[in-house]
Amino acid sequence: MLILVTGGAGFIGSHIVSAFTSAGHAARVFDALLPAAHRTPPPVPDGVDWRHADVRDRGAVVDALRGVDAVCHQAATAGLGKDFADAPDYVGCNDLGTSLLLAGMAAAGVRRLVPASSMVVYGQGRYECAEHGVVRPGPRRIAELDASHFEPPCPHCGELLSAGLVEEGAPTDPRNVHAATELAQPDQGHGHLTATMVGPELSSG
C-alpha cells in the first residue's frame, strides 16, 4: 500500500512515516517545511518518496496523489502565532489546504483518509472543582499570567481545579485562530483521529 503523509517531515508525521515503512508499506512524504514547525527537519527514511510542496498548491497535491492508496493528513499551521494578522495563514493552510486535498482525493478516487487535529480544539481542557464538579475555566487573565499563576481557577468559586483527561466526545471550545481552523477543517467535527471515506459524499466513521 502506498500512503501519502502530508506533513510527513514533522515531529508527528515523521514517526508515522517510520511506522508505515516498518510495517512494510510504501510512504510518500509531502511537506512544505514551514519555518514555524521545522528548525531542523528529520531525515527521510531510505526508500521514501519525498515531495517538498504545500497543500495549498493544487497542482502539487494532484501530482502527489498519483498511485496513492490512502492519505494520512498531518499538514497544518500550528501554534498560536504572533497576532490576528496570522489568521490568513492558518485559514489558508488548515482549511483551504485540506479542502484542496479532499477535492484531489475525490478526483483521483483515493477513498481512505486519516485526518488529524489536536487537543487545542477543546479549549482549556477538562477541569474539576471539588465543590462544583466538572467546570469550563474562562480565559486566563493577563495579571495572573504576569504573576506566573498558570493554573486556571474555578469560574464559580475561584478555587484551584484538578486537571483530568479529555474524552473525544467532550464539547469543543476553540479559543484561538489555530483551534478554530483545526475545528473548521472539512469533515472534522471533533479533534480526534477519524477514518473517512472520500467520494461523491463525505462521511466520517
Image (cartoon, rainbow, N blue to C red):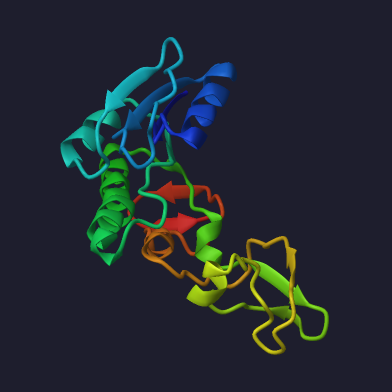
Outermost residue on the bottom side: it is 156
Q: Residue at x 51, y 60 (%)?
A: 120
Give left or right: position of 186 versus 12: left
In the figure, 107 relative to 8: above or below? below
In the figure, 21 relative to 66: above or below? above
Work out whether residue 66 can be spotted: no
Residue 180 quadrant? bottom left
Q: Residue at x 39, y 48 (%)?
A: 198
x and y percent of residue 75 in the render?
38, 42
Give left or right: position of 4 versus 22: left
x and y percent of residue 99 in the render?
29, 53
x and y percent of residue 79 in the render?
42, 52
Most foreground residue, 139 or 22: 139
Outermost residue on the top side: it is 46
Residue 70 quadrant? top left
Residue 40 quadrant? top left
Work out whether residue 97 can be spotted: yes
Q: Residue at x 40, y 16 (%)?
A: 48
Q: Residue at x 74, y 81 (%)?
A: 159
Count of numbered labels shown in the rendering: 0
Most foreground residue, 84 or 103: 84
In the figure, 44 relative to 100: above or below? above
Outermost residue on the left side: it is 59
x and y percent of residue 191 in the render?
53, 58
On-image quarter of the C terminus: bottom right
Outermost residue on the front side: it is 147
Give left or right: position of 165 versus 177: right
